[in-house]
Image: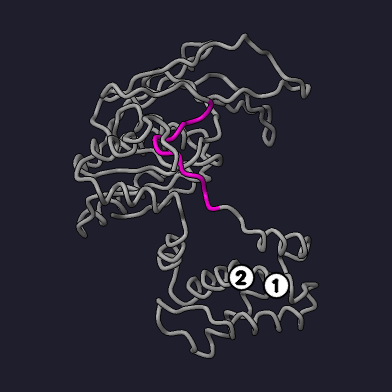
Amino acid sequence: VGYVALHRMSDGAAEELRGVVDQLVADGMTGLVLDLRSNPGGLIREGVKVAGLFLPPGDTVATSEGRSKRHSKTYLAAAPGGWDDLRLAVLVNRGTASSAELIAGALQDHDRALIVGTPSYGKGVLQTTYPLGEEVAIKLTTARWFTPTGRSVQRPRPDTAGGPGNRTPALAPTVFRSAAGRPIPDASGILPDLLVRSSLRSDGERTLHRALGDDLDRFRTALTVYVSELRAAGEVTDESFKVTPGMREELFLLLKEEGVPLSRETFESAGVYVDEQLGFEITRQLFGTESVVRRQARSDRQLLAALRVLRASRTQQQTLTAAAAARGFGTSR
C-alpha cells in the first residue's frame, strides 16, 4: 500500500500525482492512501483532473450552478490514470476544503474511494476574480458546486454583519445514494465513510505549549540546532533509531543555555511529546521526508485505520463493505 500527500490544488498537481502513482504502481503498489488532510483546495480545474485520474472517462466529477449560464457547468473525468484495480482510501479532516472536497466527494459518490478521517471544512462555492485595475481585483462568489449525486457540501456561515445569517426551518436530513446504492447523508462538508478522530494532544503537550507561549518558536529552533549537532557527531546511523533519555537531557540543557523559560518538571511531563518531536526532527535531517512519513505513520490513527482496511481487502468494494460493517455510513473508530 502506497501513501501520497497532496497539500494544495496548484497548477500541475494532477500530472505530478499521475507520475508518482504510475511509479508506485510500477513498483508493485495495489492500494493507495491519498492524504488530503489540511489541503485548502485551490484551482478547481486541478481538483477535477485529480478526481478524473481515478474515474472512467465521461463520469461526472461535479456540477456548478450560478446565476449566469457561464457559471453553470458539468465537470467530467477526461484523462484517467488507468489504475482500475487500485484500491483507494482518501484521508480528510476539517482543514480539507474547496477543490480538495470536490475530489473526495466525487470519489465517494462513485464508490471509487473509502473516505477516512473527520468531516471536512464545507466550502462548496466557486469564486471568480474580476480585475479593477493593474493591481486591484475583487473576488466574488459566483456559483455553488455539487457532487455527482447532487450534494452541496457548503457549511452554513454567519452573515457579513456577524449575525446568524439566513436560517430555514430544520428538515429531515436528505440521504443520497452512491453509484452502487450506498446511502450518503447530505452533510456540511464531506462526511467520511470511516470516522476516525485524530490523535489527541496529551496533558503534557498542552502544559508544555502553555508554558512556552510566545517562546514556542525558540523551542523549535533549539530542537533544530540540537539535531544538527547530533547529525554532525554521527551518533545516529540507522533509521530505526530510538530517542534516548540522554538525547532528551541534552536538548533540555540547550534550552536552558538559550534562556528558554521552561522548568524541568514541565519538560519531563511532556517527555513522550518531546521524544516524538526529537524523533521526527532527527529523521528529517538524517533520512529525509519519506522516512519522516514512515515514522509519523506509527502514531497516525487515521492513516493506520486506512491502511488496516486496504490491507485486509482485495477489491474496492471490500474496503467499503468493511467500513460499513458495524453501523453503516460514518462508522466511528
**Cβ–Cβ below 8 Å for labels 1 and 2?**
yes
Residue that carries the numbered disc 2 in the rendered image: 274
The answer to whether residue 256 is magenta is no
Residues in magenta? Answer: 188-199
The answer to whether residue 196 is magenta is yes
* Residue at horizontal 67 percent and vertical 63 percent from the top: 204
Residue type, label 2: Val
Quarter residue 60 falls in:
top left
Q: In the visual, does 58 lie left or right of 303?
A: left
Q: Whole-percent x and y of residue 52?
A: 31, 34
Give the secondary structure at mark 1: helix
* Residue at horizontal 76 percent and vertical 80 percent from the top: 256
- The crowding category of the residue bearing disc 1, from other C-alpha atoms within 10 Å (few below 14, some 14 to 19, many at least 20), is many
Residue that carries the numbered disc 1 in the rendered image: 267
Give the secondary structure at mark 2: helix
Residue 28 vertical placement versus 103 (above, below): below
Residue type, label 1: Phe
Colour pattern of the rendering: one colour
Q: Whole-percent x and y of residue 236?
A: 47, 84
Q: Quadrant of the C terminus?
A: top left
Secondary structure predominantly adopted by residues drawn in magenta: loop
Q: Nearer the viewer, residue 187 or 147?
A: 187
* Residue at horizontal 45 percent and vertical 66 percent from the top: 292
